[in-house]
Image (tube, rainbow, N blue to C red):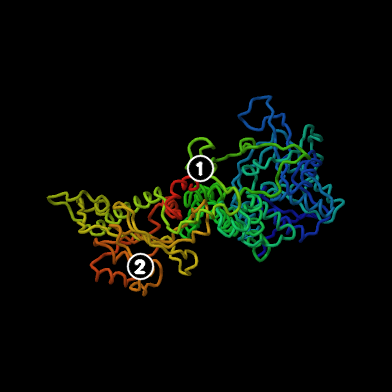
Amino acid sequence: MTTLHLVTFGPIHALPILHYRMEFAALVRAAFQAVRPDCIALELPPTLEAHILRAIRRLPQVSVVMYDSSVPLLPDTKKGETRTVYLLVEPADPLCEGARLAVEHEIPLAFVDLDLDHYPCHEEQFPDAYAVQRLGLAPYYQAFCQADSSPPGVDDLRREQGMAWRLQQLARSHQKILFLCGMAHLERVREFYGRPLTRPLERVRRSGVKVMNLHPDSCREILGEPPFLSALYELHRGELPPEPLPAASLRRSFGALELLSGGKREIPEEEALTEALHRSAHHVAEPGGMIDRQRVLLRLFQEAGRHYRQESGEPVHLWQRRAFFRYVRNLALVDGMLMPDLFSQLAAARGCLDDTFAHAYWRLATFSPWQRETAEIPSIHLHPEDLRSGHRIIRFRPRPLREGRKGLASLPFLRRKGEKRPGEWLEGFDDPSLCSFPPEDLVIEEYGAFLKKKGTLQLAQEQHRTEPFTTSLLDGIDLRETLRNLHEGRIYVRENGRIKGGVGGVVVIFDEDHGGKKFPYLMTWLGEHAQESDMAFYSSTPADHVVGPGICRCEYGGLLLSSPPRRLQDVWGDREYAFARSKAERLLLAALDYSREKHVVYVAARPPRSIFRQIAARLERKIIHLPLGSLSPVKLKKLRIFHVLFGHDKREIAGEYVW
């Protein structure tokens, strides 16, 4: 399939474009290679030529060409008011790409448009630019021409006649002219080109034009393409940098070996984001060399997930990734697009994961490694409302901000003590006894009670029966069944099953750890009092994340809660469980073996093997499986993190290091 399509008339090779779209900037480069023009003509007024060329030479830094317009641009403006016009010069715009190619190859550049003060704002509906990459430009442009039935305005005709006249003048001295023009104007420009025309009446000079540097914070809001995509396009214009190894870290916790070798090492965020950008640049292009937005979206999600795990210690699960991409697809379809915009991506990131992930996603998606304040020219802050464009607002509340009280001074991680010298925290590992942090014990016990109640309720729902109402309402009206059989004209009532026996054990499997290397730490803990359950779990190694003197941060892979306490023996060394294929199965066997009640709740992404149903039946037990995806992911993330204290004396100081 040929993506490129040129409209030819005379020596003019015209490329129909959409402004500020990366796909069309790539088509400009392809057209330049195919035509090899001796002149490039742009749909821009000559009164701005010197200022735009100055901004072009600053790329990849984004500039703003601004001037005051003395005639109202919008119907709601009062007579005599002036409006400031802002023209963004950014890498992924096709007109900027055309001017840049002309400057780099030292060929003539012509600005052929008219400078009009009172040109109205048009809200034209174009198909998603991503369709060009899949269908090609020819069917895309043909479909647009057939659907565009709106009559041109007087100012449109003036501009198109002016562009056609200038093209006629250029045709006298050039053999191949590459003309970059918006789709809405190209067909009429071609028609006017074949007619005799005179020089248009126009403004020949404009005063008060300024070239400003766009402030880095404004780049995150107002660019036509997300800065991450523009940066990828900029990297593909030249030779790609070497692909970095995936070792960039934003870690805030440190292992024992790091402490002994000289203390902490934190990579600056800008360096980590730059490495993510360079790494992504090697995986986003199709075999033909054009950047694919779908691949960019995938890499953006993966790199954001990497930073999210380094910041929060939580991985992005497969079901969360599946939910994210399904959600952004649906949001794009609702908007009539093929690919979601950045706002939809952020909304899906926040909804399918949490605010911390959405904030990491936003920082990477809006990161530009070249944009910064300079002494060369002043910087300007712009907002979407300054450009008269519609905008939507989304707010993030990352986890540390939610946990603190009002004011930065109340944030726990700002108050946490650090090492005074390398290796100081290792001096706290002088007590061989291990214990937990009591506030975390309360949380896990409360959630265990919640899972017992939820499992009992689910079992009762599985054993309910529905029947037509006769003499008793039983446990209430079954509204769903009544509506389903509305044509019968009868009311259906529901009778819930009566559950005999309680829940004696709860097993929660966050990660089955099939390889056995992700969560190698195995432990069996006994409850310290009658209101605390015995626990067996497998987790990450405590020494990998030392956060204080004798205090280590761990992550559960799976856990077992068994009550009443003080009965659990070493689950991991018990030979009777040797036939278990995984750590999760060993925990389930122990739950069935030690449970004094009839039911055991098993929370995991997948149900256990069928043989465990037989084992449970022989032990007169029953397994209640709760899918992991049916529980709150935010709550599960809080539960997965716990701390191991080396000695009961560490409980007095643990609050200063745990957050």
Disc 1 packing (10 Å; few <14; some 14–19; many ≥20): some
Amino acid bearing label 1: Pro
* Disc with the residue nearer the chain's start (2 vs 1): 1
Q: Which residue lies furthest to the front in this view?
A: 430
- Residue toward you, 613 or 647: 647
Q: Name the residue located 46 percent from the left edge and 64 percent from the top edge.
A: 521
Q: Position of residue 68 (x, y in %)?
A: 72, 31
Q: Mark 2 points at which residue?
A: 608
Give the amino acid type for the residue marked by disc 2 in the picture. Answer: Pro
Give residue 577's mark: none
Can residue 266 be seen at all in this image of the molecule?
A: yes
Position of 187 with respect to 199 (left or right) is left
For disc 1, the marked residue is: 412
* Relative depth, front residue between 313 and 367: 313
Q: Residue at x 41, y 70 (%)?
A: 582
Split into 4 quadrants, where in the image is the N terminus?
Answer: bottom right
Q: Residues within 10 Å of mark 2 (few under 14, many from 20)?
A: some
Above or below, 511 relative to 151: below
Residue 178: image location, x then y, percent: 78, 54
State how far apart marks 2 and 1 are (Cα): 40 Å
On the image, the x and y values in percent for residue 612 come to 31, 70
Of circles 2 and 1, which is in front?
1
- The percent position of residue 41, horizontal first and vertical second, equals 78, 49
Instruction: Name the element at disc 1.
Output: helix
Please identify the quarter of the rendering in which residue 66 is found.
top right
